[in-house]
Image (cartoon, rainbow, N blue to C red):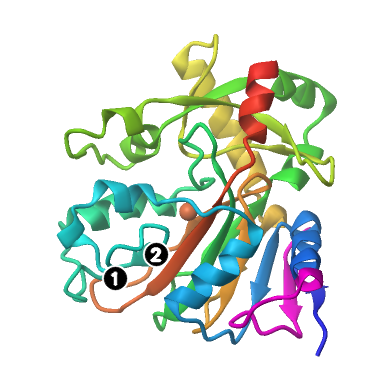
Amino acid sequence: MSISIRPVHPVFVGEVTGIDISRPLTRDEVAAIEAGMDRYAVLVFRDQALTDDQQLEFSRNFGELEVTLAGQMAKPEDRRLGDRLELGDISNLNARNELRAREDRSRMYALANRLWHSDASFRAIGAGYTLLHGRVIPGKGGNTEFADMRAAYDALDSDQKAQADELVTEHSIVFAREQIGFTDYAPGNEDRLRPVQHRLVITHPVSGRKSLYLSSHIGGIVGWPVPEARALIRDLAEHATQRQFVYSHEWRVNDLVMWDNRTVMHRARAFNDMKEVRDLRRTSIKGTGLEVQQARAA
Ligand SMILES: [Fe+2]
């Protein structure tokens, strides 16, 4: 059995076969996956039964893990997955493993995942890779969609590229949540909600390709009036999420999907979360700080 990757979309996304990611990987396998990420930006692994520990172990091959913001902000008794703060709970279940009520604050907070975003772009160093593993999948809906921000950049005209290349944006979790009317933050989280700056265009350290670093967390552009900034960001997001740049992942149990937040945006799609369970586990690798260095160089 040897690892191979085949494209599943015209511009990005590969499916990886010939590997069992529940066991320790060889250095060559890690290198093959990293090379696949540089090329495809999203990789899909089917039929990978993983425990939480195996997912954490697999993820650590690619760098230091992030602690989730939702986990940091939740009270310990509200965390369904216990004290492993590196494991994100992407489900519609509460700490008692029951479907969350319609008015549940965690449910409403998580609804912002239906907006196109890049994970943790509201941090000074955003996420590098995110890994999501499917445990329970609803019968209908609940896809995750990805949009290739390299192809989106490439498709801008030269004036648009020159403009975007110069811009520095402001990201906060507050800007994404205000778009869906969520403002109910627990006190004591002010530092985590303060905007951070990133360049709008980043260059991938390995492939050298440029991509639009877009996210619904963006609420401003440095030096621009807010309405003008938000109008431009909206135009760019519409451009970047045209269907030819988008792959929609239809989940099966034991899929693991990993993506590079510096080269793709993603969003969750709706499902009947009052009736059906959707339970995925997320791990994220800390970014390299590339975005920050580039912002300082601006
Ligand atoms: Fe996300």
Q: Which residue is mark 2?
A: 270
Magenta region's main secondary structure? loop
Distance between the alpha carbons at the discs numbered 2 and 1: 8 Å
Left or right position of 91 against 196: left
Residue 33 vs residue 102, the one in the foreground: 33
Provide the residue span drawn in magenta.
Answer: 11-29
Quadrant of the rendered image containing residue 212: top right
Circle 1 crowding by C-alpha within 10 Å: few under 14, some 14–19, many from 20 = some
Left of 177 or right of it: where is 134? right
Dividing the picture into quadrants, the one containing residue 217 is top left
Instruction: From the top left corner, tell me how far across and down residue 102 is, in percent.
Output: 17, 62
- What label does residue 273 carry, if any? 1
Looking at the image, which is closer to me, 157 or 256?
A: 256
Circle 2: element type: loop
Q: Quadrant of residue 14?
A: bottom right
Magenta-span inclusion, residue 146: no
CB contact under 8 Å: marks 2 and 1: yes
Q: How many marks?
A: 2
